[in-house]
Image: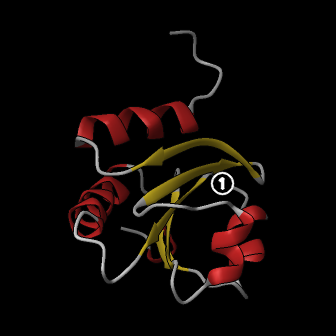
Amino acid sequence: MPEDSLITVTDATFAEEVLRSSRPVVVDFWAEWCPPCRPVARVLAELADEFAGQVTFATINADENPETTRAHRIMAMPTLLFIRDGAVARTIVGARPKSHFRQALTDLVNPYVNR
C-alpha cells in the first residue's frame, strides 16, 4: 500500500492532512479503552489496501486530541468521518461489517454514481 494511504493525525495536523487533502479521507476516531476500536482498525487497514491511491485512511486518538474530537462532536468510539473536499460526507458510529465500510468508501470515491 502507498505510504500515504494510512496516516496518523493530531489536533495540530488535522486541517492540513484531512481537510485540505486532495483526495477523500476516512478518519477513524479511536481510544485505547475502546474494545470495538481494534477490530474496526484491522478492517480499515484491509480496506486501505483495496482503496490505495483513492482514499487516505487517517487515525486519531480521541483522548489525546480533544480539540478535533470536540470540533467534530465525537461522542462515541469508534467514529468514522468520511471527508471529501474538506467536508464530512458521512459519519459511521460503532463497529459494522466490512461490507458496510466498503460500500461507504465506494460511495465516497464515486459520489455521483446513480444507485
Report whether 59 appears left or right of 112: left
Residue occupying the point 64% across, 82% down:
66
Q: Which of 105 and 38 is in front in this view?
A: 38
Under circle 1, the secondary element is loop
Question: Where residue 73 appears, x then y in whole percent?
Answer: 66, 60
Report whether 108 appears left or right of 84: left
Using the image, determine if residue 32 lies above or below residue 42: below
Quadrant, the N terminus = bottom left
Neighbour class for label 1 at 10 Å: few (<14), some, many (≥20)?
Answer: some
Question: According to the image, label 1 marks what residue?
Answer: 23
Residue occupying the point 33% across, 50% down:
50
Q: Nearer the viewer, residue 82 or 20?
A: 82
Using the image, determine if residue 51 lies above or below residue 21: above
Extreme-front residue of the structure: 75
Residue occupying the point 43% across, 70% down:
2
Residue occupying the point 32% across, 35% down:
100
Using the image, determine if residue 80 lies above or below residue 15: above
* Viewer can see residue 79: yes
Report whether 57 appears left or right of 94: right
Question: Where residue 76 appears, x then y in whole percent?
Answer: 46, 61
Question: Where residue 97 appears, x then y in whole percent?
Answer: 23, 41
- In which quarter of the view is residue 91 placed? top right
Extreme-top residue of the structure: 115
Report whether 66 appears left or right of 15: left
Q: How many marks?
A: 1
* Viewer can see residue 53: no
Question: Where residue 36 appears, x then y in whole percent?
Answer: 24, 63
User: What amino acid is at disc 1?
Assistant: Arg
